[in-house]
Image: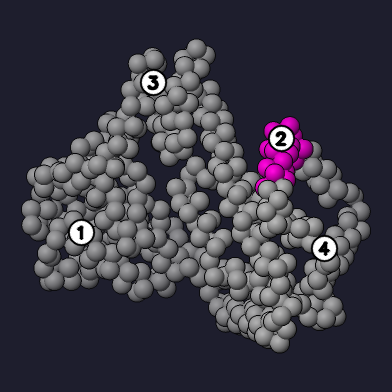
Amino acid sequence: MDLSNREISALIWIAAALGYVFYKDKNANLLDSVKQLISIFFSPKIITILLCAALWIILCVLGLHNIDMWGTANLKTTILWGFAFAFVTLMDANRISEDNTYFKKTIRDTVNVTVLITFIAEAYSFPLLAELVLFPLLFFVTAMQVMSEQKKEHASVHSLMSGVLVTVGCIYIGYGIYMVATDFEEFASWNNLREFFIPIILSLLFLPYLYLISILISYELIWVNLRFALKDVSLRRYAMFQAILRFRLDLEGLRRWKRNVGAYPSESREGILESISEVKKYQKREHNPSNVSPEMGWCPIAATGFLLNENLKTSDYHRTYDDEWWASSTYLTINEESLFSSNIAYYISGDDQAVKRLKLVLNVNNNEDSEVAEVRFHQVCEALFLSSIGDFPSESLERISHGGDTDMEVNGRRIRLRKEAFVNTSRGGYSRMMTIDYSPHYRARCE
């Protein structure tokens, strides 16, 4: 369980920084804040979850020990993994029910090739003096890189700091590879093999517990939501019982029902059952979508994925006010390096059987981004045309891309484009909205 020079250096600098901060805290304001944070952290619910997590990890470690996949020499790695992965993911467990790809991304990040590269880079450290110099240097370089990312005028600083970080990372990796090559027999030991695989195995074994906690958190949030939505205590308990009975481990269905019951509170047991059945019905339709006649509009399941290749997949298609159904995407950022970046959003709306309108919105929040934003908007428009209309005359596409307000009919679909300038902003900017209606005669409730 020996600490490497890199770990010793980190502990020395962290201890020095904390000591300096507390020494300068003459009024003990920071100390009071820390005490309040600790008191919140030691609430019964959090402590129970952490103790159960610790017990789960201990059982996993004992199981690995019994098959000779864990030894006391791996204790340091296990403790570091506990703080770096288990603790961090537990604090973010409430996000699991909102992200359908959470476990897929976690597994991918756990077993990808980056893990091997990181392991090699961390396997060997420089002499302690070098690590003591590198730790604060890399801290300040990273801080400058993050801060310079927010403003365009600091783009050169951002590029320089990014280059420094990449260079240092390559040095770490190169040094690790060199040490492995020159001392391969010692590196290729059973203990090193366990050191590499233990974090991966423990991460995978921890996911079932994380899933269980996310379910408990989801049902607790449902109960809190029902307290506001349903005033009748007996109806509230009935709704909770039915949610547990019908959804069980279905976090996605539970999330949708929580949203619906909050927006449209039911006043009877029949209403509760109908709201659950509505979610279940649409989930079933997502797995087996029915054909929608072109005269009726677009298939909702297909429409949500029209722009999937453009990173504009919508949320689930669901009921809103006045029995209108709709879905929307998150914003697609045009320029990641800009604080006020332009963005594109995609919306669909209609009834429970078919989508009647597709809408793309470009928000040019900074005139400096306008050229790049327009090119990207043109690409997304073309992708939406191909998905929703099929063949589209190139002259019509050029007219939409470079013209002002437009209203035309193509293949029985009505296409409109409107441009509006932003007001009360020093950066300028404007929005462009393109809508595709399933029929030239379609009129939405709110144009």
In the rendered image, the quadrant that contains the N terminus is bottom right
- Residue 168 visible to the viewer: no
Q: Badge 3 is on which residue?
A: 272
Magenta extent:
41-60
Q: CA distance from mark 3 to mark 2?
A: 32 Å
Q: Residue at x 68, y 63 (%)?
A: 194
In the rendered image, the quadrant that contains the C terminus is top left
Name the residue type under label 2. Thr
Q: Badge 2 is on which residue?
A: 48
Sequence-wise, the earlier of marks 3 and 4 is 4
Q: CA distance from mark 3 to mark 1?
A: 37 Å
Callouts 2 and 4 close, C-beta under 8 Å: no
User: Badge 3: how crowded within 10 Å, few (<14), some, or many (20+)?
Assistant: many
Residue 325 to residue 30: above or below: above
Sequence-wise, the earlier of marks 3 and 1 is 3
Q: How many marks?
A: 4
Sequence-wise, the earlier of marks 1 and 2 is 2
Q: Residue at x 64, y 46 (%)?
A: 90
Q: Provide the secondary structure element on which disc 4 rests.
A: loop
